[in-house]
Amino acid sequence: MQRQVRHGLLKGMNARVTLVSFVVVTVSLFYGAFHTERLGRGLALARGVLDPFLEWYYVLLVAFLLLFMVWLGMGRYKNVRLGGDFEQPEFSFFSWVAMLFAAGTGVGILFWSVAQPILQFQDNPFIEQGMSPDAARVAMRLTYFHWGLNGWAIFSFVALVLAYFAYRWNLPLTIRSALAPLLGKRTEGTLGDVVDVLAVFGTVFGIATTLGLGVQQMNAGLEAVFGLQSSMLLQLMVTAVIMSIATLSVVSGVKRGVRLLSEANFWLSIVAVLFLLLLGPTQYLIAITIESAGDYIQNLLGMTFHTNATRGDAWQSEWTVFFWGWWLAWSPFVGMFIARVSRGRTFREFVMGVLLVPTVITIVWIGLFGGTALHHELFGSGGIVAAVDDNVATAVFATIKAMDLGLLGQGFSAMLLLLIATYLITSANAGTLVINTILAGGDPEPPTAHRLLWGGLLGLLTAVLLMAGGLETLQAAVIMAALPFSVVVMLMIAGLLKALHRERYAARTGERVEAPREPWADLEDAGTQPSPVSDDETHKLH
């Protein structure tokens, strides 16, 4: 068990991890505040140097995680439960999916669901001619790729590993616990502290990047709905308001504040989808979603291993490297949050829920929002391409404006503005809770004062990154933050494989506990596993 301070300002926290993390983030804040332009140039330079390496490194890592998660969900360990042998899930299926989706990609998908298809529609390496019907289908396929199974494989892996060691091995709910089979008791010392600091570092910059994108989109929405002039001052004000609400809501905990907000924006998302489906080009939207989804499935393997080896363009770096870096940087935050709400589920339930359900929801969302924008460019009056090229953050609101629905369209834009705000708040408060859980040595209810402190730090860092150069700086920051944590991810893979040898379904020479079963057999079987490891047995990991 990690050493937590019992008295003083750091009561309930791991002192070394908290202080080092605080210093790193604070130094970044002050450097960015007083050397804003230098920070932007430095991040751009670092990204340019590392891009050739990351174009294949991130691709290989994410491809392995996708195949690994499929094996865990369908292979010999599919009935292993994240908790006791017959433990029931803490949350209902609907609440569970709503929370993991809202915390996972809600903000990002709102930002990119129109912007990315429109940008890919104009030009990408997989089409000969842009702005054509074929280009529209490919643009949708590429957007699904960056928001689908591969990304959720990263989230689901980190979440499953954390939940497995926390609820089955009775270890603290922190990143370091996943390395216990490899490092033994050294996870309680300096090595464990380094791992947790890297997790906090990636989480902080991943959340700040996402909040920055969402704030830019809210700025565009306020201009479209209320006529407020877009400006840096407005973005900073929006950041302050969002983070204040988020920090206060996270104090109320997961079961009340986070859960209620997640369910609220989930229902708002359903209303948004139905609005576009009924009032948009319905037949085209259904057709393009189905066709492009099939195209995505058909080309998934090739896209997964695409490394841009024979082309000299920057597409791979600007898109795939950025998105895989973003998912990796967010994975400690989203992974721990999903683990926090997933106790009692089997590997099979977990993989089906975290890998497949959000992917299907994402395909529907992008199909309707992106499809509406593409339809107006192909068959309508257009104008969305020009709006996106001028300001990426205006994409969604330019699409609603092109639908020409009058007051109804204005009302829908206002609802989308509310939806963006709720997703921002949900992501911010979930992220704040996760950061403090790591700093508190796995305590799911960290001290309130530290939740307030880190909520404020996240808001300030978001503001600094926005001032340092907007979208490009945000992208570079998250790619750099993800790189050190990717090494931790590889160690987590090794740690999980070593720990799984204890499970009943593990194959051992000369021993068979039960007859082999196909993935589709015994669907009603809840699984009978070894009891969760006691504190004494935990030392066997060491």
Image (spheres, grey):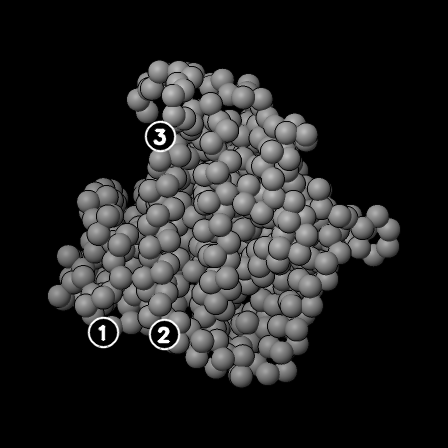
Q: Position of residue 91 (x, y in %)?
A: 57, 30
Q: Position of residue 359 (x, y in %)?
A: 36, 42
Pointers 3 and 1 in contact (CB under 8 A)? no
Q: Nearer the viewer, residue 8 or 354?
A: 8
Q: Nearer the viewer, residue 524 or 370?
A: 524
Q: At x 71% / y 42%, what residue is drawn? A: 1
Q: Is residue 531 above or below residue 479?
A: above
Of pointers 3 and 1, the one earlier in the residue sequence: 3
Q: Which residue is mark 2?
A: 390
Of pointers 1 and 2, the one earlier in the residue sequence: 1
Which kind of residue does numbered mark 2 sit on?
Asp
Q: CA distance from mark 3 to mark 1?
A: 39 Å
The C terminus lies in quadrant: top right
* The image quarter in which residue 388 lies: bottom left
Q: Which residue is mark 1?
A: 312
Which kind of residue does numbered mark 1 sit on?
Gly
